[in-house]
Amino acid sequence: MQVRNLDRDAEPFITVDGSTIRELLNVVHPPTANQSLAEATLEAGASTSRHRHGICEEIYFLLEGTGVMEVDGEEREVGPGDAILIPPGARHQITAHAGHRLRFLCCCAPPYRHDDTFLD
């Protein structure tokens, strides 16, 4: 059985889109074949760079904070408990509201790779 702890086992890093990520399950530790799971954070008022993924389907699940999610030009207010589907190839960006750090889970299938992220 593979168990990884967010605080103990997941070192933060900045992704291509500008969010801070702590990967829990990915192609490296432990090796996953079909998906990845990470926690992402954005400071209050910050946005990811608008981007798309060539083959990756993503799901964001918001844990804390509020913001605006844009997928292919459609914008929605989002907050804790919201799950957002981002199809492969869809241009997307998430922005944290001022005064609210945004924290969410990011599930990717196939697993997240830097070279599958394309900035607008």
Image: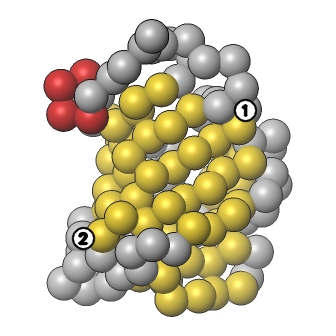
Q: Separation of disc 1 and disc 2 at Cα?
A: 28 Å
Name the residue: 25% across, 85% down. Answer: 98
Q: 80 or 89, which lies in front? A: 80
Does the image show residue 19? no
The colouring scheme, among rainbow, by chain, secondary structure or one colour, is: secondary structure
Q: Position of residue 80 (x, y in %)?
A: 39, 75
Using the rendered view, name the quadrant where residue 79 is placed: bottom left
Task: Tell whether 20 sits left or right of 15.
Answer: left
Q: Secondary structure at mark 2?
A: loop
Residue 42: give its label. Answer: none
- Whether tag 1 and tag 2 are in contact, CB under 8 A, the answer is no
Does the image show residue 74? yes
Name the residue: 50% across, 61% down. Answer: 61
Which quadrant, please, contains the N terminus?
A: top left
Instruction: Specify the amino acid type for callout 1.
Output: Pro
Using the rendered view, name the quadrant where residue 54 is placed: top right
Count residues near mark 2 (Cα–Cα under 10 Å), then give few for <14, some for 14-19, many for 20+.
some
Q: Is residue 21 above or below residue 46?
A: above
Q: Which residue is mark 2?
A: 101
Query: Which of pointers 1 and 2 lies earlier in the amino acid sequence?
Result: 2
Q: Which residue is mark 1?
A: 110
Which quadrant, please, contains the C terminus?
A: bottom right
Instruction: Specify the amino acid type for callout 2.
Output: Arg
Name the residue: 40% across, 30% down. Answer: 24
Q: Is residue 13 above or below residue 104?
A: above
Q: Position of residue 17 (x, y in %)?
A: 50, 52
Task: Tell whether 98 sits left or right of 37.
Answer: left
Q: Position of residue 46 (x, y in %)?
A: 33, 71
Count residues near mark 1 (Cα–Cα under 10 Å), then give few for <14, some for 14-19, many for 20+.
some
Using the rendered view, name the quadrant where residue 92 is placed: bottom right
Name the residue: 51% across, 49% down. Answer: 106
Q: Is residue 19 above or below residue 99?
A: above
